[in-house]
Image (cartoon, rainbow, N blue to C red):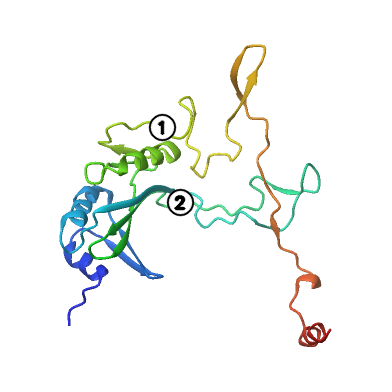
Amino acid sequence: MSDNTLSARLQDRFPTHSLRCVEALGETTLEVPATVVVEVMTALRDEPDFEFKQLIDLCGVDYAAYGAVEWETESVSGSGFSRGRQAGQDAKAVRNERRFAVVYHLMSVTRNQRLRVKVFLPDDAFPVIASVVDIWPAANWFEREAFDLFGILFDGHPDLRRILTDYGFVGHPFRKDFPLSGHVEVRYDATKGRVIYEPVSIDPRTLVPRVIRHDSRYGAVAPNDAGDKADG
């Protein structure tokens, strides 16, 4: 009996495209090389074995700090507005070989199936990928959002410009190396009668960290103690 699962059909259809298919938690994820994304996406939409007519979502991902530990720390500051971990303190340095990816969520109403397609971009300094607007017109605003927040360029997009941030905004706020406080702050200047931009005056830090404390207060409860507490 032949295997007719979605993963099997994908592997049979694209044997020479270096695709990687993963089944986890009841979901199927297909990793596609950026060079063949248009070819593969067109087949996923049009061919009767798939019929993914709907693009549910498209987003960018920055794996620059993937796996880094941000909240676990051995010590915290004891002064200031609130005790907090200073930026960079005890943080685990992680550098992933592949930084930027575009993730597509597809749906087939005919087959009642969903598929996640992940495409890693080959150039971190100039992340670019072919647009799928001609395949799914709904990708128009999704690709603009990924461009605005991650700086990912979509070749062939009809109107690639910012969609959420200001026209004069510098940088891409969802990149992992972008400071949480930003680079500039905005306020209204009554003297000048207009909104002005100034360098940000906030020192970035992570507040209320999960501190690892090695003492008896956080140790395992002894069996006798547990029984006493239950009886009381």
Residue occupying the point 36% across, 50% down:
57
**Residue 110 figure quarter:** bottom left
Q: Residues within 10 Å of mark 2 (few under 14, many from 20)?
A: some
Q: Position of residue 186 (x, y in %)?
A: 60, 26
Q: Position of residue 218 (x, y in %)?
A: 76, 71
Q: Decide if residue 172 is on the left or right side of residue 21.
A: right
Residue occupying the point 59% across, 19% down:
195
Residue 125: tell me if it is visible: no
Q: Quadrant of the N terminus?
A: bottom left
Please, what is the three-letter code of the amino acid marked with disc 1? Answer: Arg
Looking at the image, the residue that sits furthest to the front is 109
**In terms of secondary structure, where does tag 2 sit?**
loop
Q: Residues within 10 Å of mark 1 (few under 14, many from 20)?
A: some
Say the numbered circle drawn on residue 162.
Answer: 1
- Give the label, 2 or 1, closer to the camera: 1
- Number of numbered discs present? 2
Location of mark 2 (residue): 63
**Residue 128 figure quarter:** top left
Residue 74: tell me if it is visible: yes
Say the numbered circle drawn on residue 55.
Answer: none
Q: Is disc 2 in contact with disc 1, using a CB cutoff of under 8 Å? A: no
Residue occupying the point 62% across, 26% down:
199
Q: Position of residue 184 (x, y in %)?
A: 59, 28
